[in-house]
Amino acid sequence: MVKKDIDWGNLGFGYQIADYRFVANFKDGKWDEGEIITDSNIVLNECAGVFQYCQACFEGLKAYTTEDGRIVCFRPDLNASRMADSCEKLMMPVFPEDKFVEAVEQVVKANAAWVPPYGSGATLYIRPYMIGTNPVIGVKPADEYQFRIFVTPVGPYFKGGAKPITIRVSDEDRAAPHGTGNIKAGLNYAMSLHNIVDAHNKGFDENMYLDPATRTKVEETGGANFYFITKDGKFVTPKSDSILPSITRRSLMIVAEKYLGLTVEHREVKLSEVPDFVECGLCGTAAVISPVGKIVDHGKDICFASGMEDMGPVTKKLYDTLTGIQMGTIEGPEGWVHEIMKED
């Protein structure tokens, strides 16, 4: 297998068309077998359910090349499970979880030439998604759906390493109480676009959303989960029914406890206690970890002891350990690193 002629070390975090994608269709109450195709375009009726009532959900994961020449991905079974939860909430047919993992394997194998080499800092981003496809004019679920996966090679989310970011406490909510905040629906991200652009225009990197019911507790940013480190070395992550259950965050909880020996607390986190933490970070598939140096709460700066120059010491250990597991240089828990193929 010959790799694509790409300057892997200078890839940005953006989309470029790879050769193949996977597509399966749901019609007459059942899924077809699905297939690998070359056409990157989708042709739909103007009245398709996805356009009228936003029946769309998605996932995100990555494929990596390990030091010993294997192409692997990280915990795809959890992506399959989370997508099933999203589909059930949106009245969409669940794509079978075992078939989901098989489809990921198929599309990565087909695009093996696009998987960046080990040590390049780049990865192959994998985007599974599902949409309602048949015409729907009355307010109801669609009857037909399409499940697809495309891939694109991406560079590291932060060129030159992750520097601590500055975020603000948001006056807007990303989710309603008892709503869709805990699933990966496209509409959740549309809701946050105005607010993230406004934050960027005002010099902030991200928004901290509070719980929509009382607006006193930390939730997430809209694109990543929070974690905090206490003065006595505890790893704390906010718990709420309207937070998306990040696979990276769930993995970091195990890394913190089993690899770093930290006490882990998954609980409600009040905004009033945030100044007492010594480190703060965001975690998600794209960047793995984004250290937070400062939170601005309506003119009041909350600065963390770890500072604005580098990752805090615990955050650095978390990042190095988790990425080491993903890249195969550190032995991970059984089943975390899913081997797709060995390179020639």
Image (cartoon, rainbow, N blue to C red):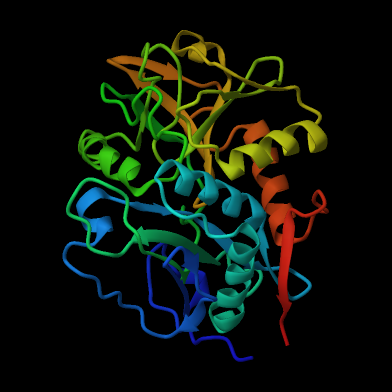
Tell which residue pokes out farthest to the bottom in this image: 2
Residue 184 in picture, x, y percent from top left: 44, 45
Residue at x-position 24% and y-position 71%: 44
Quadrant position of residue 46: bottom left
Q: Quadrant of the C terminus?
A: bottom right
Q: Quadrant of the N terminus?
A: bottom right
Residue at x-position 72% and y-position 53%: 324
Residue 123 in picture, x, y percent from top left: 56, 66
Tell which residue pokes out farthest to the top in this image: 272
Decide which of 283, 200 is in the foreground and name it: 283
Decide which of 50, 252 is in the foreground and name it: 50
Residue 228 in picture, x, y percent from top left: 58, 24
216, above or below 174, in the image: above
Residue 317 in picture, x, y percent from top left: 70, 39
Quadrant position of residue 145: bottom left
Decide which of 4, 27 is in the foreground and name it: 27
Q: Is residue 265 left or right of residue 159?
A: right
Q: Is residue 311 visible?
A: yes
**How many numbered marks are there?**
0
Residue at x-position 81% and y-position 35%: 258
Q: Is residue 205 left or right of residue 158?
A: left
Tell which residue pokes out farthest to the front in this image: 28
Decide which of 309, 2 is in the foreground and name it: 2
8, above or below 321, in the image: below
Q: Is residue 75 left or right of residue 23?
A: right
Quadrant position of residue 115: bottom right
Residue at x-position 38% and y-position 74%: 16
Q: Is residue 116 visible?
A: no
